Image (tube, helix red, strand yellow):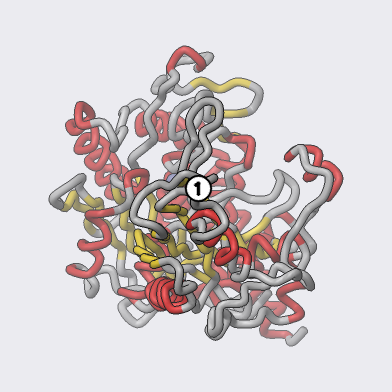
Amino acid sequence: MSQDIQILKSLIIIIMQITNNYIEANKERFLEELFGLIRIPSISSESAHKPDMIRCAEYWRDAIMAAGADKAEVMPTEGNPIVYGEKIIDPKLPTVLVYGHYDVMPVDPIDQWHTDPFEPVIKDGKIWARGADDDKGQSFMHAKAFETMVKTNTLPCNVKFMLEGEEEIGSGSLSKWVVEYKDLVKADVILVSDTSMIATDVPSITTGLRGLAYWEIEVTGPNADLHSGLFGGSVANPLNTLCEMIAKCMDENNHITIPHFYDDVVTCSRRERQLLNMAPYDEKSYKAGLGVKALRGEKGYTKIERVGIRPTFDLCGMWGGYTGEGSKTVLPSKAYAKLSCRLVPNQDHEKIAVLVKKYLEKNAPKYVTVKVTPLHGGQAYGCPIDLPAYKAAEAAYMDTYGKLPIPMRSGGSIPIISTFEKVLGIKSILMGFGLGEDAIHSPNENYRLDHFYKGIETIIAFYQHFAKGGELA
Ligand SMILES: [Zn+2]
């Protein structure tokens, strides 16, 4: 290690001591302020809560101002307002854009909550309330990390905040807002805490989110449902045909056979595959939890890779003919299916939508007509692990957890993250501090207090490393 790096590392250790002292001295107040945010029932899917959405946005604006921003405002949209705030210490320095959401999921079934969802309580070292984790507890760590750095004179770069109130209902307004205010939110990286980590002692960073393509398939045979005795054997059965067509889309290794389907899939480096597979995984309990005797997936990939870095091809539903009580012999006129593919970074969902549609329609046997309708889709997201901002995040976790965080490719999707990349041309670093057991979207949502405080520390460490180019990892 060169002497310069050694000096910079010691400097960060000193900064962390100063900021930790500030956090320790203001711990209770941080929590009280978070509770104030949680007490506002900002349920975006229920129109009765419209005034709460505005109150919640104003609360955030005031919190950012009080933390030391140059300016913060509530910006109206057609839907719920967006909170924007910034502190520019030097336009020549890099800028971090913090993204979070202040809306929460509904609370029903309300009778399953042990306490009032909008009156946070602390029990067993956790905050229990709707939004405790998703995303009030997690996003508020950023406000307090920011305050800590401003008040201790340790903020090393510019910061912008962007908070929306529609994440739980599809981010409709923000998708448009971000296009309109592209220049306002210009930054070098986006920092997000709205995901989880593997376990309380296994820190991880989400580096990938899968995309999605979705279709409905209609197969038409004879012009009416037929008597399966009088006609069976002479006319193709659309349901049988649909099964054959779908079966041909995958081979015995669970590899998708549609030509050009994998063209844009980027192969993951050996190093990244190694890191991904460091995540704890017990196949026996995984199978037991699902109630299956054996697993099935693409040959040549581990379970973690199959879910994280490989695309899928899955029927979500299939129907046609007779599905009522008892039996009715019939040769159906039509057969239907809903089909979805989870996509991986660099696969374009619109391109795949057309590719699969054309393939199925073109290869339809003569005895049926096939109509494939794309329904909806979303882009995947991937963050390279050699990106300086990722390296900075790695170094931050090393400082606070003493462990290298495991990169995690989530099988799910957060569409707004890929929208940010498309519109703003920058990557997001997903530093989530939630846990799988936090019951987000469910009754008795909770968030560990130690994660709240350690999250603040790790965020502060990220800024220190990021401002130095992430080279100290
Ligand atoms: Zn969330």
Quarter occupied by residue 355: bottom left
Picture coordinates of residue 295, whole percent (x, y): 78, 53
**Quadrant in which the N terminus appears:** bottom right
- Which is more toward the observer, 15 or 121? 121
- Which is more toward the observer, 123 or 78? 78
In-image side of 329 versus 277 (left or right):
left
Picture coordinates of residue 256, whole percent (x, y): 62, 73
Outermost residue toward the right?
Answer: 284
- Which is more toward the observer, 173 or 300? 300
Q: Image height check: is 169 above or below 325? A: below
In-image side of 18 versus 272 (left or right):
left
Quarter occupied by residue 312: bottom right
**Mark 1 element type:** loop
Picture coordinates of residue 222, whole percent (x, y): 39, 57
Q: Which residue shows up at 65% across the image and 67% down it?
A: 394
Q: Which residue shows up at 26% across the image and 57% down it?
A: 174
Q: Which residue shows up at 37% across the image and 78% down it?
A: 425
Q: Which residue is mark 1?
A: 230
Q: Report the label total.
A: 1
- Determine if residue 469 is in view: no
Q: Image height check: is 96 above or below 442? A: below
